[in-house]
């Protein structure tokens, strides 16, 4: 059993959650919306903001494959560099939901985490793809759960939507000593 006496050296954080209905097939419009939500959270004094799953391409089952193809890029890529610039200006954490990542010939549903300096400190490729919406026909599954340690946030786990439905995920993250789990979802 892990000792409960360890205390994190962090202040209370103001967390903002941005959840909007991203427009399918409109990555540039969705990027503008994400930046507006991040700036709004920053103006409200948030230390950390969480964006939704697949905010860049939208999540319409009928057009998801085409929308993913149109929005996908490597990480880092042009859109993540744009987000990083916003982060450097606002000096806040952004758990940038997920976006379609192109890695060679493969597509991943990838969560990206930026620290206060605008540096990518973690990437999580969704491990449990949701078969009823055919995510498994569009994306390759990630091969591992993601966690990272930070002096301000502690030990952080990053999951995406359906990943959180499996008790094994909580068990593994708990065994890693995770203090905080941030999970983005594609819910309306």
Image (tube, rainbow, N blue to C red):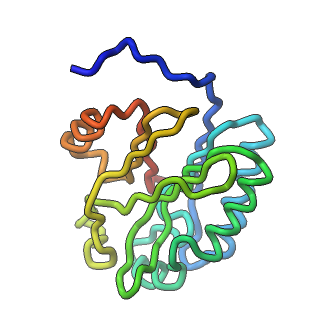
- The spot of residue 131 in percent (x, y) is 23, 66
Q: Nearer the viewer, residue 86 or 52?
A: 86
Q: Residue 51, relative to residue 156: is it above or below?
A: below
- The spot of residue 54 in percent (x, y) is 48, 64
* Residue at 30% from the left image edge and 52% from the top image edge: 145
- The spot of residue 66 in percent (x, y) is 45, 85
* Residue at 29% from the left image edge and 74% from the top image edge: 140
Q: Residue 73, relative to residue 156: is it above or below?
A: below
Q: Residue 24, relative to residue 116: is it above or below?
A: below
Q: Residue furthest top?
A: 5
Q: Residue 41, relative to residue 3: is it above or below?
A: below
In what quadrant of the picture does the N terminus appear? Answer: top left
* Residue at 35% from the left image edge and 82% from the top image edge: 106
Q: Nearer the viewer, residue 166 or 80?
A: 80
Q: Nearer the viewer, residue 2 or 39?
A: 2
Count how many numbered circles sit on residues in the image.
Answer: 0
Q: Nearer the viewer, residue 151 or 170?
A: 151
- The spot of residue 187 in percent (x, y) is 45, 53
* Residue at 40% from the left image edge and 58% from the top image edge: 124
Asked if residue 54 lies left or right of residue 162, the reply is right
Asked if residue 85 lies left or right of residue 56, the reply is right
Quarter of the image holding residue 151? top right
Asked if residue 41 lies left or right of residue 143, the reply is right
């Amino acid at each position: 059993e892990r000792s409960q006496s360890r205390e994190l050296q962090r202040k209370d954080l103001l967390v903002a959650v941005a959840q909007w209905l991203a427009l399918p097939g409109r990555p540039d419009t969705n990027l503008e919306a994400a930046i507006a939500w991040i700036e709004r959270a920053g103006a409200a004094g948030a230390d950390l903001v969480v964006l939704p799953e697949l905010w860049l391409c939208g999540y319409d089952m009928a057009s998801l494959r085409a929308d993913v193809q149109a929005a996908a890029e490597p990480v880092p890529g042009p859109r993540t560099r744009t987000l990083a610039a916003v982060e450097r200006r606002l000096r806040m954490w952004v758990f940038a939901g997920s976006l379609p990542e192109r890695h060679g010939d493969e597509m991943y549903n990838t969560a990206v985490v930026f620290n206060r300096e605008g540096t990518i400190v973690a990437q999580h490729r969704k491990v449990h793809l949701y078969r009823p919406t055919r995510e498994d026909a569009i994306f390759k599954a990630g091969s591992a759960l993601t966690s990272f340690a930070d002096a301000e946030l502690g030990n952080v786990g990053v999951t995406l939507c359906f990943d959180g439905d499996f008790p094994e995920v909580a068990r593994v993250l708990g065994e890693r000593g995770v203090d905080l789990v941030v999970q983005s979802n594609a819910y309306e």
